[in-house]
Image (cartoon, rainbow, N blue to C red):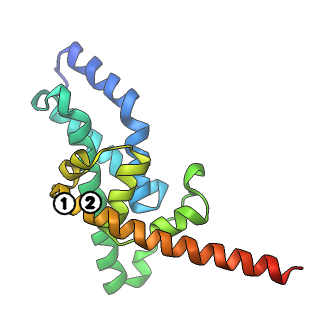
């Protein structure tokens, strides 16, 4: 959609942006862990979507945008890993404050999960997607989604049990 795009297409994109922009930023934040990077990822996705608006079916636009956010987030994380390995001083991103909802020890546990498990957990519990939708967003099979969710659940359950044990021990020690 270029500068001469019909007004109706601009209105449709603006409606999509208003309805979904914040959710896409939140998804990106949950995947990359930095609000500034999340906003940048989302902006890039929305710019690309704006240019391709006429090519995207209205019933799939949100799924398309989610997939693009996941893919751009992965690319950003890969670039960060390479930068940390080869240029440690350049790899220090600016620290933006955490999004308020994702602040705390539970979110810290989720952030320790391997990439795919974290993506599945975020898409399932923060974006409220079903297994088939997650599989489409991540371009994997439903079985992969199920096994990743199962592994993530097991890791989180173990970490939560350890956390509960530590809290109980701290409470006993305080008596």
Query: Which corner quadrant of the image does residue 4 belong to?
Result: top left
Residue 10 in the figure: left or right of residue 141: right
Res. 22 visible in picture: yes
Q: Is residue 40 visible?
A: no
Q: Are marks 2 and 1 in contact (CB under 8 Å)?
A: yes
Number of other residues with Cα within 10 Å of mark 1, as a class: few under 14, some 14 to 19, many 20 or more = few
Q: Quadrant of residue 91?
A: bottom left
| Image location (x, y in percent) of residue 143 | 19, 60
Q: Which of 52/171 is in front?
A: 171
Image point (43%, 56%), residue name? 30
Q: Which residue is mark 2?
A: 146
- Residue drawn at x 35%, y 30% is 17
Q: Which residue is mark 1?
A: 143
- At label 2, counting other C-alpha atoms closer than 10 Å, the crowd grade (few under 14, some 14-19, many 20 or more) is some
List x then y, in percent, for residue 112.
45, 72
- Looking at the rendered image, the quarter that the N terminus falls into is top left
The residue sitting at 32% across, 27% down in the picture is 16
* Residue 39 at x, y percent in the picture: 41, 49
Gap in angstroms between the C-alphas marked 2 and 1: 5 Å
């Amino acid at each position: 959609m270029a500068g001469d795009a019909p007004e109706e297409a601009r209105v449709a994109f603006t409606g999509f942006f208003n309805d979904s922009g914040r959710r896409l930023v939140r998804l990106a934040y949950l995947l990359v862990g930095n609000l500034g990077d999340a906003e940048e990822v989302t902006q890039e996705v929305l710019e690309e979507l704006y240019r391709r608006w006429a090519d995207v079916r209205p019933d799939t636009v949100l799924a398309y945008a989610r997939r693009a956010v996941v893919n751009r987030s992965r690319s950003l994380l890969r670039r960060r890993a390479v930068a940390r390995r080869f240029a440690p001083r350049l790899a220090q991103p600016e620290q933006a404050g955490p999004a308020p909802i994702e602040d705390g020890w539970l979110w810290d546990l989720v952030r320790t999960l391997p990439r795919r498990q974290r993506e599945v957990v975020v898409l399932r519990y923060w974006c409220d997607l079903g297994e088939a939708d997650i599989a489409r967003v991540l371009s994997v099979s439903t079985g992969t989604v199920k096994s990743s969710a199962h592994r993530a659940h097991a890791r989180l359950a173990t970490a939560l049990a350890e956390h509960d044990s530590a809290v109980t021990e701290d409470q006993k020690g305080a008596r």
